Image (cartoon, helix red, strand yellow):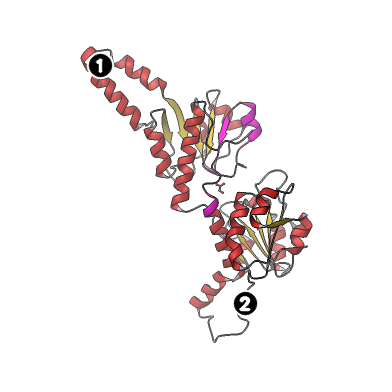
Amino acid sequence: MWCSRMALRRLQRIVCTLNITGGLTGNMQREMSTLQRVYVTRQIPPEGLKILRESGQVQFELWDSDDVPVPRKELLQKVKGVDGLVCVLTERIDAELLDAAGPNLKVLSTMSVGFDHLSLEELKKRGIRVGYTPDVLTDAVAELTVALLLTTSRRLVEATHEAKTGGWGTWRTLWLCGHELANSTVGILGLGRIGVAIAERLAPFKVKKFIYTDVAPRPELASIINAEYVSFDELAKQSDFLSVCCALTPETKEICNKNLFSKMKNTSIFINTSRGGVVNQEDLYEALSTGQIAGAGLDVTVPEPLPTNHPLFTLKNCVILPHIASASYTTRNAMSALAANNLLLGLRGEPMIKELKL
Ligand SMILES: O=CC(=O)O
């Protein structure tokens, strides 16, 4: 259903005025035609929907579910002629979709920090502006990364399973031992806002040293956490905990493969809360099952959802979460609001709060 509460109120006002003077239908049509058309590909959290409804700027149609993504065929139909599009990371925004939308489409706003689901080249070619939602999720992602790291390194999933299923016998000296953060070296692959936030949270655990690698040194960010820039190989060799924080790009696709795992210590823990595509999962399975590395915690996989019969699920030393790093009520609402505001600003031709430079 095309909806905008504010627009409705304005129409009601027009109705009231013009009831006296007549000519209602023409004015109503003019009023409706000034509203820009938007399609929202998911039932996004309420704060964003409220902003869109009350904007008086757009009429929008929504795929009214959060449980199933909009089917591709339906999406290709619904985007026809829209001025703006709000999407989430499950939608592939490529040439086919942009062609289906047509030349009216001026703004795409994704409710995500990641943008590997967007064909930036196609968007740029068509002059479509792109909004995204960094920063507002940094705290939630960093918090979840720390939780996943500790869950993996201290073997919490195995431990609760043992406690519940009768494996808990007498207190044993080396049973369920893991690896601790105190005196460790933590490596960050791709140092950005999230990597810094993770390190800030890990520092009080008495980490000895933070190291990072990236396409180039990032001294301003690194100085916040006193991190040393090292080569990719050194990151692999030195890290007791290696946290992947880089975006998925053609350059980082499967960058975590046997080359990396074979250089890591057999006591090291690998954590990925960025994108599954940065990891070669066959190589990771090999590294985990042969004891080349001690454990892995993954919030992201390829594909998502990861089929329940995937070999990685058979490993005790692999903790897999269903892509929930930013999943706190506060953060998801903030992402929704930011996505809505980016869209409205973009449609007005104004600078967005967070816009991707294409
Ligand atoms: O993965 C989540 C996001 O990109 O926001």
Identify the magenta region. 112-140
Q: CA distance from mark 2 to mark 1?
A: 77 Å
Q: Is mark 1 within 8 Å of ligand 1?
A: no
Name the residue at 41% across, 42% down. 47
Q: Is residue 79 visible?
A: no
Q: Which circle marks residue 177 in the picture? A: 2
x and y, in percent, of residue 226 in the image = 67, 57
Q: Which residue is label 1 attached to?
A: 18
Asked if marks 2 and 1 touch (Cβ < 8 Å), the reply is: no
Q: Residue furthest bottom?
A: 170
Vertical side of 189 occupied by 81: above or below:
above
Give coordinates of residue 152: x percent, y percent. Answer: 60, 67
> Pointer 2: residues within 10 angstroms few (<14), some, or many (20+)?
few
Residue 69 visible? The answer is: yes
Residue 235, image x, y percentages: 74, 59
Question: Quick check: 248 above or below 97?
Answer: below
Q: Which mark is residue 298?
A: none
Residue 84 vs residue 56: left or right? right
The three-letter amino acid code for the residue at tag 1 is Leu
Residue 281 lies left or right of residue 347; in this view the side is: right
N-term mark: 2 or 1: 1
Identify the residue at image location x=23%, y=12%. Answer: 21
Residue drawn at x 44%, y 52% is 329
Label 1 packing within 10 angstroms: few (<14), some (14-19), many (20+):
some
Is residue 264 within the magenta segment? no
